[in-house]
Amino acid sequence: MLFLLFITNIGVSQNQAYLYKEFLPKSVVHNNEFMKMISQNIMKLGPIHPDLIYFYLEGLRYKTDNSIDNKTRSMVLTELQKIRTNYILKRNDWAQSQINILNNAKVNRKTLEEAKKYFKKLITENIVAYRSSGTTRENDNKVQKLEKEIPESRANSQDVTNEYKVLIDSNLVDCFAVIYYNSRGNKNYDSYSNNKYQKIVLEKEIIQNYKEALENSDLNIDNFLSYWYLYQGGLNGYNEISAADYVREIISSKNRNALHSGISFGTYYSTFLISPSIEDEIYISGMNDNVKIKEYSAKSQLGLFCDYSFKIKQELEPFSVLKIQVGLSRSTEPQKIDFSSGFLQEKYIVAGTKVYRKLEFYTHELNIQSLSTYMTKISSPVYILNNSLYLEAGLLFEYLQYKYELSYDYHFLYQISYPTVIGVWITKTMANVRDGDFNVSKKYDKFIVYPILGIRYRPMQHVFMYVGSIPSNVSIEISYNF
C-alpha cells in the first residue's frame, strides 16, 4: 500500500485519471486521449502539491460546463491558474532555501554539489522568468494576497469562498490528496467523512517511512523530494533536520558505502598486448661463447587475487582509499616457438689470421610449458564519475616465471687460416661438430614494474568489476568485498 508508493513513487501509474473518474466531466471520461492527457497532468501536478489536483480538475469542470457563462469561466480559470502559479512559486522558494542551507554547510564539496542538483530540478525556470519580468511576489499585491488565500490548513469540511468567487470544497481537496497518496481506485468520496484526518495520517506515514530509510543507501532522492511540502518545517520528530541536510546525509551515506574498505577476493583474466620476452643462452660445442636467444611469448592467464583497501577519507573522492592487491595467475597451455639464430656465418681477420665460423641449426624449438605470474598492485581512485564508477591509477609489480624446454640440433664449423714463411696459406679446422637431440629444461624469471590505469565499477553492493591496462597487457577482474 503506502510502502509501495514510497518505493516506486506515484509517477509509475499511467492511469491516474481513472482514480478520479467519478469527479471528471462525462464528456472526457470515455475519451482515451483526454484521459491519458489528464493522467499526465496529474502526475506532473502531484509532486508540486497534491492540492493542485483539485484545482486542475475544477478547472476542467469549468471548461466543460456549458451552464457557466464565459465571463465567469474566464475569471475562474484565471484565478485557478494563479493558484497553481503560487504553489510553484512556493516550491521554487523552498528549493532555493534548501540550496542556501547547502551553500552554508561545511562538508565535502562534491557531496554538496550533488545534493544541490536535486533541489535545482525542483525549480521551475519559466516561473523564474515570470518573476524577472517584473511580476514578483514583492511587488505584486495580488500574488501576495493570493498566497494568504491558499487553504493550507482546514479545520473542518466546510465550503469556503475566496474574494475571487472561486468556490473551494476543502474536504474534496483533501479527498483528492488521499486518493493521490493511496493510488487506489476504490476510494469513494463521502462529503461527511473526515478526509483531512486521513490525509494527515498518510502524510505522517510518508515522513516516518523516509525517516526509517535514512540508512538505506539505495533510497530514491527524487521520490523523497516529491513530498517537499511535508518538510517545510523540517522533518518533525527527527531533530528538526532540514530536507537539505537529509539529502546531504543520504548522498554522504552512499559515498561512504561506495568507499569500500576491508578485504576482497576475486578472479581475473589477463592477456598480453606486448608479449614478454624470454632471454636465454644455449651451449654450442666448440664455441667460446654461448649463443644468445631472445623470443617473445604471448599467453592469456586466469588468476586469483585478494586485496585490502585502507580507507584514508570518509567519502569517495580522489585518493580516498589505498588498495593493495596480491595475485597469482598461471597458464599451462603449451606453446612452441622457433627461436632465432638459426644460421650464422662470419669471416674476419685477426692479427693476419683469417677466421671462418659457420653455425647452422636444423631444429630450434622453444617449448613453453607454463607461465606463472605473481603480482602486487598498489592503486587509488583518481577521478570519480559517480558512486559506482571511477578511474583508478597505480603501480603494478609483476614477477614472471617461465618453465620451458629447448630442443635443437646443429652443425658448427670453425676454421682458421694463416700464411707460412713461404707464402702458403694453411687452413686448420678448430671445430667441426654435428650434434643434435638437445632437450634442456629451463626456468626464466623476470621482474617488471608498470604504471597502471583502470576503471572500477560496482554493479551491486560488495561486488566490483575492474578493467585495467598497462603497457604490456589488459586485465579484467571481478571481486567480492567483505
Image (cartoon, grey):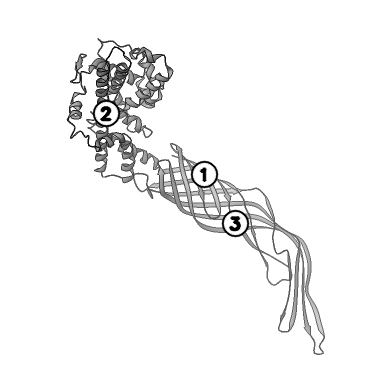
Circle 2 crowding by C-alpha within 10 Å: few under 14, some 14–19, many from 20: some
According to the picture, the residue beneath numbered tag 3 turns out to be 276
Is residue 268 rendered to the left or right of residue 390?
right
Instruction: Measuring from the top left, give residue 469's x and y in whole percent.
Output: 52, 51
Identity of the residue drawn at 58% across and 58% down: 445
Mark 3 and mark 1 in contact? Answer it, CB < 8 Å: no
**289 over 159 or under it: above or below:** below
Label 3 – label 1 distance at C-alpha: 21 Å
Kind of residue sitting beneath label 2: Thr
Q: Which of marks 1 and 2 is nearer the N terminus?
A: 2
Q: Residue 85 carries which label?
A: 2
Res. 338 image quadrant: bottom right
Instruction: Measuring from the top left, give residue 465's x and y in whole percent.
Output: 49, 42
The number of callouts visible is: 3
Secondary structure of the residue carrying numbered label 2 = helix
According to the picture, the residue beneath numbered tag 1 turns out to be 477
Identity of the residue drawn at 29% across and 35% down: 246
Q: Which of 349 and 82 is in front in this view?
A: 82
Label 1 – label 2 distance at C-alpha: 53 Å
**133 over 373 or under it: above or below:** above
Is residue 19 rendered to the left or right of residue 154?
right
Is residue 334 rendered to the left or right of residue 34?
right
Q: Which mark is residue 345?
A: none
Kind of residue sitting beneath label 3: Pro
Instruction: Measuring from the top left, give residue 95's x and y in whole percent.
Output: 27, 35
Secondary structure of the residue carrying numbered label 3 = loop
Circle 1 crowding by C-alpha within 10 Å: few under 14, some 14–19, many from 20: some
Res. 28 image quadrant: top left
Is residue 462 rendered to the left or right of residue 152?
right
Q: Nearer the viewer, residue 419 or 224?
A: 224
Secondary structure of the residue carrying numbered label 1 = strand
